[in-house]
């Protein structure tokens, strides 16, 4: 498939999104906006301990409270075998999943669900929680990833069998992975300069503004309907079916509008509980998390510590890199260690690389995906040490990156050889940008960093129905998290040759459309987009057949051009072109409804690269860092809707700035989470931020008809190091641990002043 | 406990409701009046997703009790468009893609409208500080701030 360079009518323009009016008027229904008649309300009892044995649970008093309709605990869930089963692109272990949605033998983190109640009102349900008597035996806990790897650390699961890691003793290390290229000993021997450093990042929450919410309704015949805010209705169906032992055909999941996810809504928390409660009571059950529950029991992404070693010649050619990345997984295995290792130095053409990673259990909520899972963490280490190397060599940090940039034909340490990629262009544009040349004032510094993310394809289905009046409906199966309906409709309009406003894109429930892997991996505009394009082509093929029938010629004698069927050549005959509307009007007479379909497991995602420039000013009195200017350059393949592509870049950059400067989980000495609200878990607010300039490089992905690459994830990869590198240039102090919050930076500035004074 | 009987106006229409003492205005709007345009992101006054106007004052409806609203004028996102006609801020947000997921959007729009009614020529800094209580995790604020400033410019132009 080649990406044609032709003039487009819709692709590349800035259309009003089809769901826009409902979202600016308050009409759009998000997770908690949905209600059913007869609905009752569910609440969850959560563990107050970081780590404890559950000795007993007595629910009798709660059950006796008037208005309480059902109480469930882990007893109500059948246990699941411990085995890795494929689910979408990854593997899941349902033994862990059932324990995460409802604690069984032990509670493993503060906030871990222990029981759930359904009652006629939220207030009664909350009162009932207080009447549930849980006897715990508190166990020692571990919160920090490095502590958890030490001998003698409290062990979360003494039955866990590590993958890729040999030990006879119980361990918190769930998995060890390794990626190698060349011979790093030789590489370091050839180096003139070798630098070794250790870095650390904190766990952060995805921070979507909409808490998790669900309404589940199970009828007497066992048919379940679930409405929820999720990144994947099919994922919810699979997981609920497995956890509750229900056949897939009995579960229908309708995704609501989704108020942000960023990876955090690729798992289930409330859905199996609400469904089970509803089946026990025979009434619809609504459950909504409070913000406190969101922080204590959902998300976050991993924090980690890592060692990097880099070697280079005096000319700046990187000869070898080694790295060890230790990521906390939370209470169950599944930290994104493999992608963290694979992405760390993927922007570079380095002959000798060895990177290993550890997936480590700690007494925190099980991590969920967060934009480019793993990559921002390892890139913080890798891009910080590349910056230190540039300093050591006295080289411009972008020139150093350009000298070592991966390009078409580069073999990445994680395996593949890159096809057409736009990484070098992102560096060139950054170097030429006036931001990079602008003067800086006192206490100000500029940092740069690059980033890589694979992007994915995956299972995708789409239907394009031609309506009798010549308009069209596009049905796909991925929740629209940031404008994907618009992109899908624009590609369909382009293929069909009709007005964008005549295409209505809708998102089907699990019974309305074939399977779609969830919204994640930056896949929707690429992979579901490809299915939509193919479904539109299928509709066009049928339209051409209808014209052939009317003209009594062979179908291959008809071509589709600008929304009309035309004879392929004068040899076919002289016919007036037939418009899509004209063909649609006669569809009944020419063979019936015209419906295009496509379903496939889409391959060929084009990787994304980005290079960011960040200016900061540091207040030496307070340690406060202000971001003054920010420019994010990214290879986007081709921007179907440039505004929403820019939006992805800007939003990702700001999340990264928050990760770098402020966001962290604060645990008490008992292992309970102390900052469970937005006041204390501080995400960036409008007054913290400058404008974020998004610069798009368009190096089309040759395996998509419009050249699309995923764009949503790579923008979160460079900012952590870009900010830290800028702070170093402003202060001379290298922050090797995030966040660079005022107290931490102040302490670092003070100790460097003391050191300087002593010297 | 007896419920409070409250009489108020909501988006210009008379409205009556019963609420318990602990129900917030946000609870009343969403659960009693079925006006789900105002969103709950935190219930603690930190996110601004629940922003409404009460007697021309911008408030977090999660921090106001329903029982406090007797004889008050309440305005929510549902009343922002004038019939079929969107408010210029709503139109600009659509044209400039100032929303991604859209969960913060009702609160941001209500807050931005309140700003423009006080100040039809805000600086970027003024917009950023005015909206500092409206969290958005998707957009990075860039397009929101621009859309508010561009709407103000249009409104000044149209007023000439
Ligand atoms: S819900 Fe009111 S401020 Fe967040
Ligand atoms: S658009 Fe999603 S939170 Fe603002």
Image: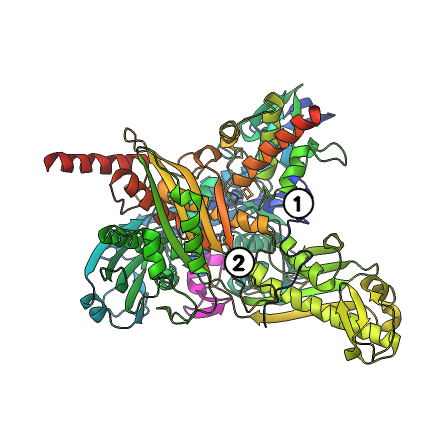
Q: Write down the region rendered in magenta.
A: A70-96
Q: Residue A201: give x, y in percent of width and height.
A: 32, 49
Q: In this rendering, is residue A344 above or below A352?
A: above
Q: Residue A567: give x, y in percent of width and height.
A: 81, 74
Query: Which element carries disc 1, helix, strand or loop?
Result: helix
Q: In this rendering, is residue A545 above or below A406?
A: below
**Which disc is residue A698 wearing?**
2
* Image color mode: rainbow
Q: Is residue A59 visible to us here?
A: no
Label 2: few (<14), some or many (≥20) within 10 Å?
some
Tell me the quadrant of the picture where the N terminus of chain A can be found.
bottom right
Look at 25% across and 70% down and name the residue there. A166
Name the residue beneath numbered marker 1. Answer: A20
Look at 67% across and 63% down and name the residue there. A511
* Residue behind label 2 places its C-beta within 8 angstroms of ligand 2: no
Q: In this rendering, is residue B28 above or below A600?
A: above
Residue A172, picture quadrant: bottom left
Instruction: From the viewer's perspective, tell me whether residue B70 is left or right of residue A342.
Output: right
Q: Residue A268: give x, y in percent of width and height.
A: 51, 55
* Marked residue chain, label 2: A
Instruction: Check if residue A30 falls in the magenta segment.
Output: no
Look at 68% across and 41% down and name the residue there. A27
Q: Residue furthest left?
A: A759
Label 1: few (<14), some or many (≥20) within 10 Å?
many
Write down which quadrant ligand 2 falls in: top right
* Marked residue chain, label 1: A
Sequence-wise, the earlier of marks 2 and 1 is 1
Q: Nearer the viewer, residue A125 or B74?
A: B74
Q: Residue B133: give x, y in percent of width and height.
A: 50, 31
């Amino acid at each position: 498939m080649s990406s044609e360079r032709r003039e487009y009518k819709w692709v590349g323009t800035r259309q009003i999104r089809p769901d826009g009016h409902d979202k600016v008027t308050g009409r759009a229904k998000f997770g908690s906006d949905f209600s059913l008649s007869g609905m009752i309300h569910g609440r969850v009892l959560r563990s107050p301990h970081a780590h404890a044995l559950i000795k007993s649970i007595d629910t009798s008093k709660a059950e006796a409270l008037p208005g309480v309709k059902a109480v469930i605990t882990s007893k109500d869930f059948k246990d699941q075998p411990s085995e890795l089963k494929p689910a979408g692109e990854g593997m899941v272990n349902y033994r862990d999943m059932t324990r995460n949605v409802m604690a069984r033998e032990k509670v493993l983190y503060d906030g871990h669900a222990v029981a759930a109640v359904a009652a006629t009102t939220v207030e009664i349900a909350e009162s009932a929680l207080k009447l549930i008597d849980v006897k715990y035996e508190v166990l020692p806990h571990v919160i920090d990833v490095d502590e958890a790897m030490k001998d003698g650390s409290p062990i979360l699961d003494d039955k866990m069998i590590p993958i890729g890691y040999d030990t006879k003793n119980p361990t918190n290390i769930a998995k060890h992975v390794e990626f190698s290229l060349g011979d790093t000993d030789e590489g370091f021997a050839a180096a003139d300069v070798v630098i070794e450093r250790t870095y650390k990042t904190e766990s952060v929450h995805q921070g979507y503004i909409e808490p998790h919410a669900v309404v589940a309704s199970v009828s007497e015949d066992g048919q379940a309907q679930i409405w929820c805010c999720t990144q994947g209705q099919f994922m919810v169906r699979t997981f609920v079916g497995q956890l509750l032992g229900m056949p897939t055909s009995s579960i229908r999941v309708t995704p609501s509008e989704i108020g942000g996810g960023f990876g955090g809504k690729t798992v289930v928390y409330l859905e199996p509980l609400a469904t089970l409660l509803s089946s026990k009571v025979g009434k619809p059950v609504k459950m909504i998390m409070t913000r406190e529950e969101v922080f204590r029991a959902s998300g976050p992404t991993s924090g980690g510590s890592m060692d990097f070693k880099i070697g280079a010649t005096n000319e700046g050619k990187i000869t070898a890199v080694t790295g060890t990345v230790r990521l906390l997984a939370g209470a169950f295995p599944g930290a994104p260690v493999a992608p963290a290792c694979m992405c760390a130095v993927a922007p570079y053409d380095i002959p000798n690389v060895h990177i290993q990673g550890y997936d480590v259990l700690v007494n925190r909520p099980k991590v969920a995906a967060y934009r480019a899972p793993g990559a921002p963490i390892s890139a913080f280490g890798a891009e910080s040490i590349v910056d230190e190397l540039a300093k050591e060599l006295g080289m411009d940090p972008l020139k150093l990156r350009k000298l070592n940039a991966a390009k078409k034909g580069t073999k990445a340490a994680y395996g593949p050889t890159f096809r057409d990629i736009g990484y070098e262009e992102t560096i060139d544009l950054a170097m030429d940008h006036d931001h990079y040349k602008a003067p800086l004032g006192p206490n100000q510094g500029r940092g740069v960093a690059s980033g890589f993310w694979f992007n994915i394809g995956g299972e995708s289905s789409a239907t394009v129905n031609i309506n009798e009046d010549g308009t069209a409906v596009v049905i796909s199966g991925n929740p629209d998290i940031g404008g994907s309906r618009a992109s899908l409709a624009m590609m369909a309009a382009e293929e069909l040759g009709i007005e964008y406003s005549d295409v209505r894109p809708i998102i089907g429930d699990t019974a309305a459309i074939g399977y779609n892997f969830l919204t994640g991996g930056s896949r929707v505009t690429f992979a579901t987009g490809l299915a939509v394009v193919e479904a539109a082509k299928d509709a066009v093929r049928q339209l051409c057949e209808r014209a052939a029938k009317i003209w009594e010629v062979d179908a291959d004698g008809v071509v589709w051009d600008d929304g009309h069927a035309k004879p392929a050549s004068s040899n076919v005959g002289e016919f007036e072109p037939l418009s899509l509307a004209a063909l649609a009007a006669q569809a009944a007479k020419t063979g019936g409804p015209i419906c295009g379909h496509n379903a496939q497991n889409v391959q060929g995602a084009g990787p994304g690269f980005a290079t960011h420039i960040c200016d900061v000013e540091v207040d030496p009195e307070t340690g406060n860092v202000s971001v003054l200017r920010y420019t994010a350059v990214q290879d986007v393949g081709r921007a179907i809707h440039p505004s929403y592509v820019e939006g992805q870049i800007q939003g990702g950059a700001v999340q990264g700035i928050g990760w770098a400067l402020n966001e962290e989980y604060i645990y008490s000495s008992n292992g309970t989470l102390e900052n469970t609200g937005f006041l204390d878990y501080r995400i960036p607010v409008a007054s913290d931020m400058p404008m974020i300039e998004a610069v798009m490089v368009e190096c089309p992905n040759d395996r998509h008809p419009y050249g699309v690459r995923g764009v949503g994830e790579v923008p979160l990869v460079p900012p952590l190091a870009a900010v830290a590198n800028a702070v170093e240039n402003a202060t001379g102090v290298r922050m090797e641990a995030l966040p660079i919050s005022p107290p931490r930076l102040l302490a670092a500035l003070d100790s460097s002043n003391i050191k300087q004074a002593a010297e | 406990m007896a419920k409070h009987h409250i009489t108020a106006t909501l988006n210009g229409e008379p409205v009556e409701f019963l609420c318990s003492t602990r129900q917030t205005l946000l609870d009343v709007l969403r659960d009693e009046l079925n006006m789900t345009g105002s969103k709950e992101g935190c219930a603690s006054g930190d996110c601004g997703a629940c922003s409404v106007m009460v007697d021309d004052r911008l408030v977090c409806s999660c921090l106001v009790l329903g029982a406090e609203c007797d004889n008050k004028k309440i305005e929510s996102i549902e009343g922002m468009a004038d019939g079929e006609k969107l408010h210029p801020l709503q139109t600009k947000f659509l044209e400039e893609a100032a929303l991604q997921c859209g969960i913060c959007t009702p609160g941001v729009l209500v807050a931005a409208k309140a700003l423009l009614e006080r100040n039809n020529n805000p600086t970027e800094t003024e917009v950023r500080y005015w909206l500092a209580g409206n969290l958005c995790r998707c957009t990075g604020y860039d397009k929101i701030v621009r859309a508010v400033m561009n709407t103000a410019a249009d409104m000044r132009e149209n007023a000439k």
